[in-house]
Image (cartoon, coloured by chain):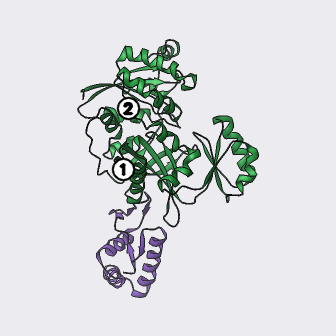
Chain colours: A purple, B green
Amino acid sequence: MRIKLKSNIAVSDNGFVFDPATGDSYSVNPIGVDIIRWMKTYDTEAEVINQIIETYDIDSKTVEKDLYDFLNLLQNYQLAENA
Amino acid sequence: MKKQLTIAVSGLNNTDNPGPGIPVIRALKDWKGIDVRIIGISYDHLEPGLYMHDLVDKSYSVPFPSEGADNLLLRLEYIHEQEQLDFIFPNFDAELFTFIKLAPRLEAMGIKTYLPELEQFEERQKYRLYEYGEKYGLNVPKSTTIHSISEVPEVLKQFEFPVVVKGKFYDAYIAYNQEQVYSYFHKIQAKWGLPIILQQFVYGNEYNVTALGDGKGNTIGAVPMRKKFITDKGKAWAGVTLDEPALIDMTKKLISASKWRGGMEIELIKDKNNKLFLVEINPRFPAWVYLPVAAGQNMPAAAVKLAFGENVNAFTTYDVGKLFVRYSFDNIVDLSDFQKISTIGEL
């Protein structure tokens, strides 16, 4: 994966994301929770995209666009970094 | 070490600009296996801690250190006669110099302290911090001390706006132009006197670390925190413990190089390039010291143990993501209590 979630980022079932290095916390929706967890599980963006398509009724083009938007957001908040 | 200790604690002003006294007392009361009797020492009859009888067993008024060390010592001798003190925990910046000077005489009376040495205390003063950073290889934002307002225009040539205008002991304001520097200079001078410190402002997030050094270069405890809610006085009203090794590393480097003895709080700023700057060293535990205690590092108790020559192992872990959230509380006080402390100086 080109963009990696920082290893110590924690996410709870109800979408509370905590960055223990800065003390900042965020809220994500259920799809955000899934993506953050899959980012920890899978090695490539393609695998995450496939998993989203399998789980949600959505086309790959939309997923790809939205995923990269989300990853950029994670990077802006310093929750993820370039691998 | 005795199983019962009588410990005098100052800094009982648990207001919106809280002193560390009450959190230090809570830490000492949490000390398992040791029964601690707390003697409050106070400079003002309305310090809230005086009236917190569940935490403070007995209180005495003491003269301000500015009235002379001998006056303070006389009063402490009286309190010692009444209470047989084992240890004194001074918690105000403004009294530490006097207590450091009095420490050998207190020790001779049988009262222990655990304070930095005078040179350790002096060299980290705000107006010497830039040189301190150079001496110990720590990043400190450029700063200059000024003793007269006429120096401002010339000194400002070394800085870019914004700059931080700081008092010798307390207060700091961010100035975005020369007029604001003048205004804050007068404001701080009127309250805290001279000198005034001008420091280059560093954009970034602020972090704080509570730590304890053993005087031999070892860090006994260190817990970093990020303020989550700040009052209009700039005080933390809520904060959370962090897992950020760079903050601990810088703390250990500082304690190792300076051989710091006692409690301390360091304030750091991380800029957008993740470079850490040391912006302040407070030579005592901060008002949020109970957060590290709740997270697993009872540093006030460890400081007392060290003072008694006990072997204290360095803390190695703490809970990350532990929060403190302050609150205010109207403690109802009988006039007779206020009368006692006001007239006879004891409660």
Question: Would residue A20 be seen by someone viewing this image from the given angle?
Answer: no
The residue at which mark 1 appears reads as B322
The residue at which mark 2 appears reads as B25
User: Which kind of residue does numbered mark 2 sit on?
Assistant: Ile
Query: Does B271 appear above or below A70?
Result: above
* Chain letter belonging to callout 2: B
Q: Secondary structure under badge 2?
A: helix
Residue drawn at point x = 49 percent, y = 63 percent: B275
| Closer to the camera in the image, A15 or B129 | B129
Residue drawn at point x = 51 percent, y = 34 percent: B15
Residue drawn at point x = 36 percent, y = 65 percent: A9
Distance from disc 1 to disc 2, alpha carbons, whole Å, reads 20 Å
Tag 2 or tag 1, which sits nearer the N-term? Answer: 2
Name the quadrant containing residue A43.
bottom left
Query: Does B135 appear above or below A68?
Result: above
Quarter containing the C terminus of chain B: top left
- Residue B332 pos. (x, y %): 46, 24
- Residue A50 pos. (x, y %): 33, 84
| Closer to the camera in the image, A43 or B203 | B203
